[in-house]
Image: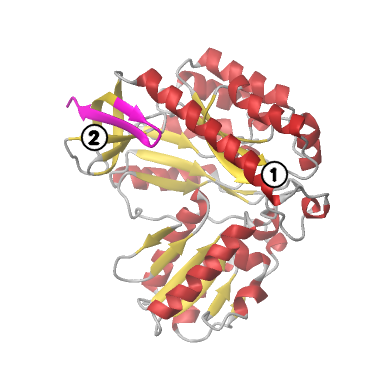
Amino acid sequence: MSAKPEKGPELITFGCRLNSYESEVMAAHAKTAGMDDVVIVNTCAVTTEAVRQARQSIRKLRRDKPDAQIIVTGCAAQIDANEFAQMPEVNHVIGNDEKMKAETFARLSQGLGERVQVNDIMSVRETASHIIDGFGSRARAYVQIQNGCDHRCTFCIIPYGRGNSRSVPAGDVITQIRKLVDNGYREIVLTGVDMTSYGPDLPGQLTLGKLVQKILMHIPDLDRLRLSSIDSIEVDAPLMDAISSEARIMPHLHLSLQAGDNMILKRMKRRHLREDSIAFCSEVRKKRSDIVFGADLIAGFPTETDDMFENTLALVDECELTYLHVFPFSPRPGTPAARMPQLERQVIKQRAARLRQKADDVKTCYHKKIAGSEVELLMEKPDIGRTPHFSQVKLNPKFQPGHLVKARITGYDNSGLTGVALS
């Protein structure tokens, strides 16, 4: 969760990088509408815990800000608007389509909007581009290239919050990135719900790889381009070529793997096998030896046996993963996985703990490997920078956020690296 505390509309953002981007768009719309006394809670629905945290935050907000207007939006609000509308703390509930429209906030500021404004997200056919000047931090900016998902993984509720896949036209993406680069941003992160599905709904046979190549060609002043989570089975040849040959693409890929056992992957309705994941990581590493991989992994999916879990654990080494996002399985009402035979919660907790310990081990091993090396840091805070491989480094001396600084890694632990500036 992140907060936007400066004067004007306040944004409380849960969940993914796409939500962070959309919060910036909403902040601009609300500010233009003169809604300085509003708090917008941008929810996430990926787990039941995320929904619980959002509700808890809303109740606390009302206690702390009894006179504020509280607007709830995001995936959880889209999927179950009534749940939030029944909360006495909430003034308005708006859907994922409505939240991106300036007219929604203009009407709310005039007292004209209905209390609940949530349309059928599956009826939305386009994702409009939104040109914004910047973000709360000067370090990096997020740019939406795609929204929605056409796949129906059995554990996932997000398509019902985001709708079907829609792509932002390449020209609009390039215009947005150029504006952000002109405003001083050194790193751009491309984001979406299912980024590797980019393009089929647009003219010209566009793909994610072709879009990346266009961005790099048309914006030579862009220092760093980073990809958020991708589905490795959908990576096209132009994207592989760009990752292999273009130094401005950061050597860190976060993969949507979810599991390392083929039967579990089948029951998840994923589109890849464990062998596909291993082959992809091996191929990319041959083309770009300094690449590091992160991955999402779910512990305790329904019907998962001990041997199946061990296959997921082994995948970490077979793919040489460095960063893990571990999710204990949490059944989402309305998904097929919620109707499957569930594991005991204690078993799920134990498996998640083992995966998290594995995550600590592989990250520490990587940090040990790069200790003593020279890196270029993008400063996020005066004393915190991020390497191209997305490792966090505590730096001495301090620099302004947004600066690129040459540094040497001097130490490491589970929480991150330490370094000293060379320039």
Q: Position of residue 302 (x, y in %)?
A: 77, 45
> The disc labelled 1 sits on which kind of residue?
Val
Q: Looking at the rendered structure, which numbered label has been put on residue 395? A: 2
Side of 162 where 288 appears, left or right: left
Q: How far across and how far down the image is residue 402, in percent?
A: 27, 42
Element at badge 1? helix
Identify the mark nearer the N-term, 1 or 2: 1
Q: Which residue is mark 1?
A: 347
Looking at numbered disc 2 in the image, what kind of residue is underneath it? Leu
Q: Is residue 252 above or below residue 29?
A: above
SS at badge 2 = strand
- The location of residue 408, given as percent across then percent down, is 25, 23
Magenta region, main secondary structure: strand
Q: Residue at x 33, y 42 (%)?
A: 181
Q: Is residue 141 left or right of residue 193?
A: left
Q: Which residues are magenta?
A: 411-423
Q: Is residue 251 above or below residue 304?
A: above
